[in-house]
Image (cartoon, rainbow, N blue to C red):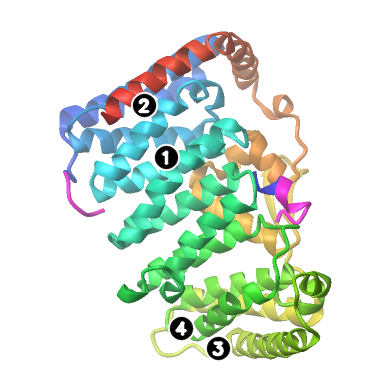
Amino acid sequence: MGKSKRSKVRGGGGGGDDLIDSSDADSVGSSSTALSDLSISYATEHLNSQEFVLDKYIDALYEKRGSTREAALSQLADAFESFILHGLVENKYATLLSLFNNSIKKGSTKEACLASRAIGLLALTLGADSSSHEIMEESCAQLSRVLQTWPDASKMISAFDCLAVVTFVGAADLAETELSLKAMWDVIHPKSGSNVGTIRKPKPPVLAAAISAWTFLLTTIGSWRINTDNWKEPITFLSTLLGAEDRAVRMASGEALALCFELNLLDVSFYEDGDVENGGTGGSRSKLFLDMQALKAKISSLASNLSMEAGGKGADKKNLTDQRDLFQRILDFVKYGECPQESVKISGKRDVLRVSSWSELIQLNFLRRFLGKGFLKHVQENGLLQDVFDIKTDTAETLSSIDKKIFRSGEEKGRALKLNKDRRLAQERKNAAMLNE
């Protein structure tokens, strides 16, 4: 998981059935209602009902009708957002992952987008353990193929988000993270990829999403320092995107560059000793130093201009204000070393999530957007997010009386489920293999 590597840097559409058959929707929809109403049940009954509903969703994913699978995926995503289902999915993740990947491979665009999101939510639910590493290994190849085939924009954006999340949670070392970073960068800057003969430029929404996902994943490199010369080309390209017509692209590029400053990727002196060990010369370091200083000056100038950009006729005032605020923050950081500050109220009067670096702010914004309405729930009860943001809470103290019963029963049920884990996992893998035949 990202934090252990950072050393406290912490840093529709498409083919297929789009309309849901009423009988299918009623079946899956009734399950959703049952799941939403479970909070008023007794603890043990609550957990048994959740598992029953989860199994019903899984059964729906085997159906041939695309609309049935789409409805099940949508309700599963809602369940992952609304509840912390670790104890229920830890023995079913292999089957879920196989079904999700099958939906990405064979389903409609809508189904593939829902499945990509479900995989990311599954990884966040399970946390940084061997199962999440397996999710990353099983998903990365499929997601990379999606990015290489350049399907429609929504499918690519979903693939970027999913690839970023599963790598953030499951990558064990720099090499695994670099593979995902490269898959993203080959879309951001196709000339640097392997398919030079067929260069395609991504549309602005895809480009902005790719840069955002790439930047989020870059927050995990922490102490994995890389020679500055390797970063000259991507930093130079990102600086050119500050002049892009699309505001979202400009803002995503600005955040990426701010992170590069924070990680000292433009600081030649930071790598001086390593450069000598790698056979570098004083002359090459001197030229690189001058190149990086020129880049810093260019970025500072562009950030200053964007922080004061005047709104033209018909301009979106909110987005323009957001851009001005972002680039003023970047300018203050580059010029004066002032770090961005932000806080989010979690619960009660005292529990507040505070961030004070670009790495933390980028992680907060990305995960808040990805989790949507489930962000606060996961921050309050998901150990992974509490570790990422250094949140110290006693889960049992923050729960209601009914939820406390559920929490304790969940622990007891989890221990019982552990006894059957090996047998059930073997059966799940057998089912998954049969599905892929």
Do callouts 3 and 2 mark residues in contact (Cβ within 8 Å)?
Answer: no
Residue visible at 28% across and 61% down?
Answer: 152
The residue identified by callout 1 is 118
* Residue 309 numbered mark, or none: 3
User: Of callouts 3 and 2, which one flags the residue occurring earlier in the amino acid sequence?
Assistant: 2
Q: Position of residue 179 (x, y in %)?
A: 52, 55
Residue 158 visible in this rendered orientation of the protein: no
Q: Position of residue 34 (x, y in %)?
A: 38, 22
**Amino acid on which disc 1 is placed:** Ala
Between residue 428 and residue 25, name the one nearer to us. 428
**Residue 15 part of the magenta-drawn span:** yes
**Amino acid on which disc 2 is placed:** Thr
**Amino acid on which disc 4 is placed:** Ala
Label 3 packing within 10 angstroms: few (<14), some (14-19), many (20+): few
User: Of callouts 4 and 2, which one flags the residue occurring earlier in the amino acid sequence?
Assistant: 2
Between residue 174 and residue 283, name the one nearer to us. 283
The residue identified by callout 4 is 244
User: Of callouts 4 and 1, which one flags the residue occurring earlier in the amino acid sequence?
Assistant: 1
Residue visible at 51% across and 79% down?
Answer: 320
* Residue 110 numbered mark, or none: none
Between residue 271 and residue 380, name the one nearer to us. 271
User: Of callouts 2 and 1, which one flags the residue occurring earlier in the amino acid sequence?
Assistant: 2
Left or right of 99: which side holds 255?
right
The residue identified by callout 2 is 33
